[in-house]
Image (spheres, rainbow, N blue to C red):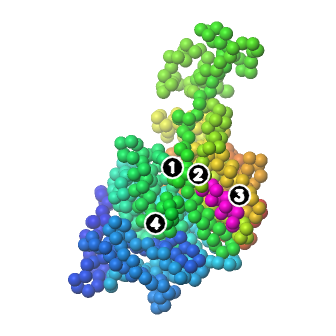
């Protein structure tokens, strides 16, 4: 039977005693020594050619600072120690220690551990980046790992694969919601309870949430087996975060900047990331994989993003022209009628969407009696797609990266090309390619759609007819910024592979400039656990994926119903993206399969299917 409440970290400390604790946490040492617990395992990240970040949390019972030693060895038995040092776990840092262990050899594996007297942490394995010529390199790209919505089977699969060099987390490592929020119902169903059980707002909250996630055995196994390179997305702070706010933050929850600062501090503490000494909020950075590739990690979420547009507030309604020669009795003009010499004015009017095409309701007296929030059946105000695209979407001042990061990206791509690296791999959060809304009206089972959600699907059909984006939080909501990025991608000697997460779905895209010329390819990773489109759109997942593919000029394949990861394999001759799915995350009894694969060769900027 699933527990009714999740154990707290304090409860875990109390219960991890006697023989079980000795096995789980390591020997306790001599009599009288203060016990220290490595409850959250170890981790490594941000490897370079000569160094890597090592991470642990040493939790004492007495709450005092803990002096630790760390070791890096060439073998798992630690017979040959290649680097060692000391560090202190401080209460003001949540007893977390991060060490930038240098003096290592490029392109080789190492083992590491932490000790406090005879208290010994679990052993971790890490690997430095290679230099010079590299024949092959493999990255596992993943995202969106809501604890409550499933078991971390995907992490387990990646941890157990010996051929993967780097675990690449593209964001939503944690989620901010409580058990009464998004995903909570599933958590109660399968016995996955988050702590705290409320929405997290403060530094204490965020630390506790990370700590709870990191008690998971599969997440610990992943961190112990692979070095991780990570970037945040929105849920490490709050849903649909932008540089000055978030959709899931209200005034009664306090100042957003205080919440964002707490989220930032906890993230930098709990992730094995190398912090920027000049600006702790700057997580965009690059890693060289010898002469083979440059991995360029971006922040499309916090540091420079303009506020997202919203269809509900930002898109103007369609209007209709009227002859206002008699201002008291405007006369609606016929379609295409532009009389000369008469005063013309346009008024926003609703449309009867039961006709094809929709018919304007031009009785202005009647229109004045309507409540826009409760219109009669079949009557809707329709978006003016043309004005929205021209006045809002195309605004060149809106950015998803910010001016400084855009400039940094351009210089980083140029430097990679000048160095002669074959691939430029962009690791970032949200889908870059064009994914317009799809019309599901003939696909979904309307009997399974609650009445209060039916209008949302009808609105989706309207967006689809106007070729408007399905997701304004993605690069589709910032097309001018995307055009600028594409111009940088198209420079001489560049072969860009974009990686994305966020959507809980799998996408393969050929990215094209405004002139239709190919500029890059994109592999978008599914979620680790977070539910996909299948949880919200009642219909055949294959038909849903096909509808998205048909609507998009960039999308060549999609799967909207499975959890998994993308294995990216780089070699001088090609870059491959292969999607691996688990058949369930609601049980630890699961199977894994390879679902699809594509490749791109240098200079083509276009995907071809793998066998």
Instruction: Say the numbered circle drawn on residue 587.
Output: none
Instruction: Please report whichever mark, 4 or 3, sits nearer to the chain's N-terminal start.
Output: 4
| Mark before the other along the chain sequence, 1 or 3 | 1
- Disc 2 and disc 3: Cα gap in Å? 17 Å
Task: Give me the residue at 34% from left, 58% from top.
Answer: 204
Label 1 secondary element: loop
| Residue 243 lies within the magenta run | no
Task: Name the residue tied to disc 2.
Answer: 402
Front disc: 1 or 3: 1
Mark positioned earlier in the residue sequence (4 or 2): 4
Q: Are marks 1 and 3 in contact (CB under 8 Å)?
A: no
The residue positioned 67% from the left and 27% from the top of the image is 357
Rounded to the nearest whole Å, what is the CA distance between mark 2 and mark 1?
Answer: 9 Å
Circle nearer the N terminus (2, 3):
2
Q: How far apart in space, not on screen, are marks 1 and 3 (Cα)?
A: 25 Å
Q: Which residue is mark 3?
A: 489
SS under mark 2: loop
Residue 351 lies left or right of residue 572; in this view the side is left
* Disc 1: which residue: 243
Badges 2 and 1: C-beta atoms under 8 Å apart? yes
Q: Nearer the viewer, mark 2 or mark 3?
A: 2
Q: Position of residue 97 (x, y in %)?
A: 40, 72
Q: Quadrant of residue 316?
A: top right
The answer to which of marks 2 and 1 sits earlier in the sequence is 1
Question: Which quarter of the image is occupied by the C terminus?
Answer: bottom right
- Residue 411 covered by magenta stretch: yes
* For residue 103, above or below residue 241: below
Residue that badge 4 annotates: 271
For the record, the magenta segment spans: 405-416
């Amino acid at each position: 039977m699933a527990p009714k409440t999740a154990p707290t970290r304090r409860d875990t400390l109390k219960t991890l005693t006697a023989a079980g604790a000795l096995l789980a946490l390591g020997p306790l040492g001599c009599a009288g020594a203060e016990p220290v617990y490595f409850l959250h395992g170890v981790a490594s990240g941000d490897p370079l050619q000569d160094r890597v970040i090592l991470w642990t949390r040493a939790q004492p019972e007495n709450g005092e600072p803990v002096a630790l030693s760390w070791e890096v060895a060439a073998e798992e038995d630690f017979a040959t120690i290649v680097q060692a040092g000391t560090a202190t776990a401080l209460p003001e840092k949540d007893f977390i220690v991060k060490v930038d262990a240098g003096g290592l050899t490029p392109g080789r594996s190492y083992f590491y551990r932490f000790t406090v007297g005879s208290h010994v942490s679990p052993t971790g394995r890490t690997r430095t980046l290679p230099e010079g010529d590299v024949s092959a390199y493999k990255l596992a790209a993943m995202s969106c790992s809501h604890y409550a919505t499933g078991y971390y089977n995907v992490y387990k699969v990646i941890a157990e694969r010996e051929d993967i060099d780097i675990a690449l987390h593209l964001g939503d490592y944690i989620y901010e919601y409580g058990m009464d929020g998004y995903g909570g119902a599933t958590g109660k169903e399968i016995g996955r309870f988050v702590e705290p059980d409320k929405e997290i707002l403060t530094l204490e909250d965020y630390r506790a949430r990370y700590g709870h996630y990191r008690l998971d055995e599969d997440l610990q196994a992943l961190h112990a087996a692979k070095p991780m390179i990570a970037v945040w997305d929105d849920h490490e702070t709050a849903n649909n975060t932008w540089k000055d706010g978030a959709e899931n933050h209200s005034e009664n929850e306090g100042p957003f900047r205080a919440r964002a600062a707490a989220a930032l501090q906890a993230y930098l503490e709990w992730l094995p990331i190398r912090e920027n000494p000049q600006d702790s909020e700057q997580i965009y950075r690059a890693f060289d994989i010898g002469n083979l590739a440059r991995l360029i990690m971006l922040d499309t979420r916090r540091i420079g993003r303009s506020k997202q547009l919203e269809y509900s507030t930002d898109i103007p309604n369609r209007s209709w022209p009227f002859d206002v020669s008699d201002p008291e009795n405007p006369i609606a003009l016929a379609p295409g009628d532009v009389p000369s010499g008469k005063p013309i004015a346009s008024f926003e009017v609703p449309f009867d969407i039961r006709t094809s095409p929709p018919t304007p309701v031009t009785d202005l007296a009647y229109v004045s009696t309507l409540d826009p929030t409760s219109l009669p059946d079949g009557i809707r105000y329709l978006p003016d797609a043309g004005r929205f695209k021209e006045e809002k979407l195309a605004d060149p001042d809106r950015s998803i990266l910010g001016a400084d990061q855009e400039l940094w990206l351009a210089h980083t791509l140029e430097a990679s090309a000048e160095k002669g690296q074959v691939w430029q791999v962009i690791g970032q959060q949200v889908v870059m390619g064009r994914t317009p809304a799809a019309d599901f009206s003939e696909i979904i089972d309307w009997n399974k759609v609650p009445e209060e959600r039916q209008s949302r699907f009808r609105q989706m059909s309207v967006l689809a007819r106007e070729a408007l984006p399905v997701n304004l939080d993605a690069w589709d909501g910032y097309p001018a910024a995307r055009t600028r990025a594409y111009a940088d991608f198209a420079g001489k000697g560049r072969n860009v592979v974009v990686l994305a997460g966020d959507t809980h779905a799998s996408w393969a895209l050929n990215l094209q400039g405004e002139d239709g010329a190919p500029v890059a390819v994109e592999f978008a990773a599914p979620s680790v656990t977070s539910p996909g489109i299948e949880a919200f759109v009642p219909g055949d997942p294959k038909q849903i994926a096909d509808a998205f593919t048909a609507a998009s000029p960039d999308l060549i394949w999609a799967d909207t119903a499975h959890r998994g990861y993308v294995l990216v394999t780089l070699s001088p001759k090609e870059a491959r993206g292969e999607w691996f799915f688990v058949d369930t995350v609601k049980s630890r009894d699961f199977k894994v399969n390879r679902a699809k694969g594509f490749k791109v060769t240098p200079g083509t900027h276009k995907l071809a299917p793998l066998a």
